[in-house]
């Protein structure tokens, strides 16, 4: 008889796992608490504006293409992509910005202008990033780590030094570049991983290969097209999808998951895979004796930042912006310290501005602008209405100075989204946007395990697990754990 598996959560971790498991012969039911799939990648519509609420950088396209190829289909039949031009714009102060694009000569000219010999240094930096990326993809990312010995093996000890697993990114970049702006361009992506250049292993210089060499893409119709594509694939694979279906308990009998309970109804299962927030799910869906990790464990994790987000619809265009825009404050250490050292709302801050309407006409009415502002902030902070309003004003004031133009009078749609929304909408531990950070102590085998240590047939996928934070990483995590699940005699 076909074995049944319950997947708890319809974020990318759950959607991709459900697809793989169905392909491998399981009868899969996916339960999602919200009425939309996609998890943090949901859509908020207001009038004719359509906001991608979460991820907006489509990176590492090969991972997505490989995922669809695993099902014998072509990604292009599910959604199409375009390469952004430029990839992104970086503002350093009002009137001072640089564009990073697919045109390598232009990017080298930018670095040459920032620092003597900048073009040659960039070439050297990207060559090592590419080398590390290739080794990481072949050796480390698509792999389940079950013991520390498996991680600290001969290969890692030898390759690990070359890959800079054991040194810090900021010191590593400093070996190549002295200019603050050049360093920021090469380090900013650590925020994508929920880390800071100071606590991330230098291995993560691979992120510069990811954005500068591989490129920055966007699905036609927005990130929601990716979610819709996955939903279609699930349908084709025969997955039963239940939305507005919050799992309230994982029923464990004789050390095995036997069912999930949804609104008091029991759904028997031969195995369970959890994609919901790991910390929350362990603590809330299992009895104390069935949990792999204690509350102390979760409280002592280095949490990735969460996000203070403002979605804005404007009734006119802003020619100063491109699709992805970043502002880096100088110096930016205080902002990182306010996230990782002494959690507090920062005094000075860097931020990201998405302007999807720059090249996607479907997300805003004609001659309007669809913006969202995103400021990484520490998880677990108080975000009262008063604080939100204060920050809303602060960000807008800064932005108006940055682009040299008033925008307040042009706002026709607005929404603030922060800690308590992440908790309410996704059961996010401490209101986190990204789960746990990518420090060395929280990399590979040191991330929460994809298998329960107490319940034989209970598994996990999603950003808490190896390889970690970011949409492509959740695809990889699912591929790894699903083939392991199927190979086992459960
Ligand atoms: C604002 C923002 C911007 C980002 N930008 C980028 C980017 O540009 N590029 C990139 O690659 N990554 C980005 N990320 C990171 C990326 O979005 C995440 O790493 C990834 O989407 C996490 O997917 P997941 O499946 O692990 O978790 P989630 O998306 O959180 O999915 C978990 C799902 O479980 C559901 N759930 C929770 N409890 C229950 C329950 N009891 N029963 C049933 N369902 C439940 C939740 O509702 C949710 O749908 C961003 C994240 C955020 C928040």
Image (tube, rainbow, N blue to C red):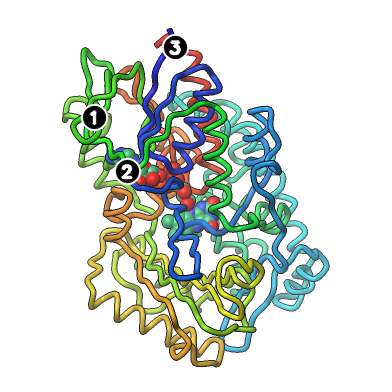
Quarter of the figure with the N terminus: top left
Q: What element carries label 1?
A: strand
Q: In which quarter of the image is the C terminus?
A: top left
Query: Horizontal placement of 402 versus 112: left or right?
Result: left
**Residue in the picture at 49% in, 92% down:** 406
Q: Is residue 360 left or right of residue 384?
A: right
Neighbor class of circle 1 (other Cα within 10 Å; few <14, some 14-19, many 20+) is some
Q: Does mark 3 have its CB less than 8 Å from ligand 1?
A: no
Q: Name the residue under label 3.
A: 2
Q: Is residue 31 above or below residue 147?
A: below
Q: What residue sits 80% from the left and 64% below the top?
A: 104
How far apart are labels 3 and 1 at the CA level?
21 Å
Question: How far is mark 1 from mark 2, CA to CA?
Answer: 13 Å
- Residue 378: image x %, image y %? 33, 62
Tell me where residue 72 appears, x and y as whole percent. 68, 27
Badge 1 is on which residue?
261
Which of the two labelled residues, at mark 3 and mark 1, occupies the earlier sequence position? 3
On residue 244, which mark appears?
2
- Secondary element under disc 2, as helix, strand or loop, is loop
Q: Which of marks 1 and 2 is nearer the N terminus?
A: 2
| CA–CA distance in space, label 3 to label 2 | 26 Å
């Amino acid at each position: 008889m076909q074995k049944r598996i319950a997947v708890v959560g319809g974020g990318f971790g759950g959607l991709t796992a459900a697809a793989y498991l169905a392909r491998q012969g399981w009868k899969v039911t996916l339960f999602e608490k919200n009425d939309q799939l996609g998890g943090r990648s949901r859509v908020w519509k207001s009038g004719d504006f359509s906001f991608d609420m979460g991820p907006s950088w489509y990176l590492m396209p090969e991972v997505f293409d490989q995922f669809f190829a695993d099902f014998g289909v072509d990604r292009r039949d599910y959604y199409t992509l375009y390469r952004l031009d430029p990839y992104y714009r970086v503002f350093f102060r009002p009137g001072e910005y640089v564009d990073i694009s697919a045109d390598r000569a232009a990017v080298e000219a930018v670095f040459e202008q920032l620092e003597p010999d900048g073009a040659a240094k960039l070439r050297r930096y990207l060559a090592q990033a590419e080398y590390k990326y290739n080794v990481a993809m072949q050796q480390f990312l698509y792999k389940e780590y079950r013991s520390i010995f498996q991680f600290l093996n001969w290969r890692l000890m030898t390759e690990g030094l070359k890959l800079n697993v054991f040194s810090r990114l900021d010191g590593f970049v400093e070996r190549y570049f002295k200019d603050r702006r050049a360093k920021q361009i090469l380090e900013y992506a650590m925020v994508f991983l929920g880390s800071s250049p100071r606590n991330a292993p230098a291995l993560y210089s691979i992120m510069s290969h990811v954005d500068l060499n591989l490129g920055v893409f966007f699905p036609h119709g927005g990130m929601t097209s990716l979610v819709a594509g996955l939903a279609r694939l699930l349908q084709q694979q025969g997955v039963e999808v239940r939305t507005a279906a919050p799992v309230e308990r994982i029923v464990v009998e004789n050390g095995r998951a036997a069912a999930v309970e949804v609104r008091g109804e029991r759904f028997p299962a031969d195995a369970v895979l959890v994609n919901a927030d790991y910390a929350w799910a362990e603590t809330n869906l299992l009895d104390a004796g069935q949990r792999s990790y204690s509350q102390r464990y979760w409280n002592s994790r280095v949490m990735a930042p969460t996000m203070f987000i403002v979605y804005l619809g404007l009734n006119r265009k802003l020619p100063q912006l491109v699709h992805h825009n970043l502002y880096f404050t100088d110096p930016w250490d205080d902002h990182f310290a306010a996230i990782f050292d002494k959690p507090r709302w920062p005094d000075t801050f860097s931020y990201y501005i998405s302007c999807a309407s720059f090249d996607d006409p479907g997300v805003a009415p004609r001659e309007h602008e669809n913006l969202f502002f995103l400021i990484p902030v520490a998880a677990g902070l108080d975000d009262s209405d008063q604080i939100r309003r204060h920050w809303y004003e602060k960000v807008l004031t800064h932005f108006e100075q940055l682009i040299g133009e008033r925008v307040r009078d042009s706002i026709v749609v607005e929404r603030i989204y922060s800690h308590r929304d992440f908790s309410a909408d996704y059961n996010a531990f401490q209101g986190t946007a990204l789960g746990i950070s990518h420090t060395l102590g929280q990399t590979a085998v040191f991330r929460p395990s994809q298998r329960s240590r107490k319940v034989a047939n209970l598994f996990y996928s999603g950003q808490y697990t190896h390889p970690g934070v970011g949409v492509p990483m959740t695809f990889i995590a699912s591929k790894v754990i699903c083939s392991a699940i199927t190979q086992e005699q459960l």
